[in-house]
Amino acid sequence: MESLLNLPVAGGGRIRILQITDTHLFSGKNETLLGINTWESYQAVLAAILADGRQCDLIVATGDLAQDHSAEAYQHFAEGIARIAAPCVWLPGNHDFQPAMYGSLQDAGISPSKLVYVGDSWQILLLDSQVFGVPHGELSEYQLEWLERKLAAAPERHTLLLLHHHPVPAGCSWLDQHSLRNAQELDNVLVKFPQVKTLLCGHIHQELDLDWNGRRMLATPSTCVQFKPHCSNFTLDTIEPGWRWLELHDDGEVTTEVCRLQGAVFNPDTASEGY
Ligand SMILES: Nc1ncnc2c1ncn2[C@@H]1O[C@@H]2COP(=O)(O)O[C@H]2[C@H]1O
């Protein structure tokens, strides 16, 4: 049976969601990606979120949680996210190893649900755009059919759609070759369902808020390494790691804000030419 997460809405009629993405954790907590210790930057992000003290109803983790396919990396992710008292749902990115991801997160009590009903007026759908072994994304026929079924089954619900890969060019040609390759097929489904007005991605390690055929496509900084916007070749940014808050309102409106760590604590190796 498919697992459905039912999230009640408390007084006030709005739901506050925290997006954490692209943690790129390793089995060893001392390991680094492009000069940044990804466990430490993840911990710093979580500490800043806790210090901020905002209400959090749901955490969404939008892929590339591990860099090295290890079960330990996912256990580290779970250990960190347990610091925040809210349920968490996740989807895979191109770097993830789903057998270890599914098993370790499930063992840690993190729901594998890809369908979240939020009160009576919203749903959140989480897609798998991973093509194992390559950086670009694609939605399988199964994913597209599943999406269409879920949208048809709840036409009255505003829908927030989550996937790792960006369906619209981000403006960095080196990254746009790794985008969602069959975005047109996704568009062919979504055009029938006007209740999908917002898509939320990871993957591109930068903040974006773009129009995609009348929908809003949001992307969010990684908790570790940042990519510099509008570059044709691989370029790291020295801007700090970040996360995103979203508020889903009863009338279908989404308000959102990206936050970042303060102070230049995590300095990437800007001379590096890729990974
Ligand atoms: N120099 C590079 N040129 C093009 N792609 C790269 C380069 N370095 C890394 N990548 C890939 O681009 C991807 C973008 O984000 P990911 O973390 O998914 O993983 C990255 C790599 O698979």
Image (cartoon, helix red, strand yellow):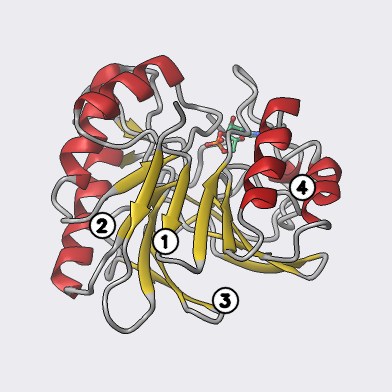
Task: Identify the amino acid type marked 1.
Answer: Val
Identify the disc placed on residue 252: 3
Q: Nearer the viewer, residue 65 or 247?
A: 247
Q: Position of residue 144 (x, y in %)?
A: 72, 36
x and y percent of residue 86 in the render? Answer: 22, 55
In 3D space, how far apart are the residues under numbered discs 3 and 2 (Cα atoms)?
A: 29 Å
First reached walking from the N terminus: tag 3 or tag 1? 1
Report how far apart the C-alphas of labels 4 and 3 lie in the structure: 33 Å
Relative to residue 253, is residue 8 depicted above or below? above
Q: Quadrant of the N terminus?
A: top left
Crowd around label 3: few <14 · some 14–19 · many ≥20 (10 Å):
some
Near mark 4 (Cα within 10 A), the count class, few <14, some 14-19 or many ≥20, is some
Q: Type of residue at label 4?
A: Ser
- Residue type beneath disc 3: Gly
Specify which label sits upstream in the sequence, 3 or 2: 2
Q: Which residue is mark 2?
A: 45
The local secondary structure at tag 4 comes to: helix
The residue carrying mark 4 is 173
Above or below, 70 relative to 218: above
Image-based side of 18 in relation to 83, left or right: right
Q: Are marks 2 and 1 in contact (CB under 8 Å)?
A: no
| Mark 4 → mark 2, Cα distance in angstroms | 28 Å
Q: Are marks 3 and 2 in contact (CB under 8 Å)?
A: no
Q: Measured from the top left, where is residue 139 in percent x and y?
A: 71, 33
Q: What kind of element bears circle 2?
A: helix
Disc 4 or 3, which lies upstream in sequence?
Answer: 4
Q: Secondary structure at mark 1?
A: strand
Q: CA distance from mark 3 to mark 1?
A: 12 Å
- Kindly report which numbered mark, 2 or 1, lies closer to the viewer in this rendering: 1
**Disc number lying in front (4 or 2):** 2
The image shows residue 242, relative to residue 111, as above or below, that is below
Ligand 1 within 8 Å of disc 2? The answer is: no
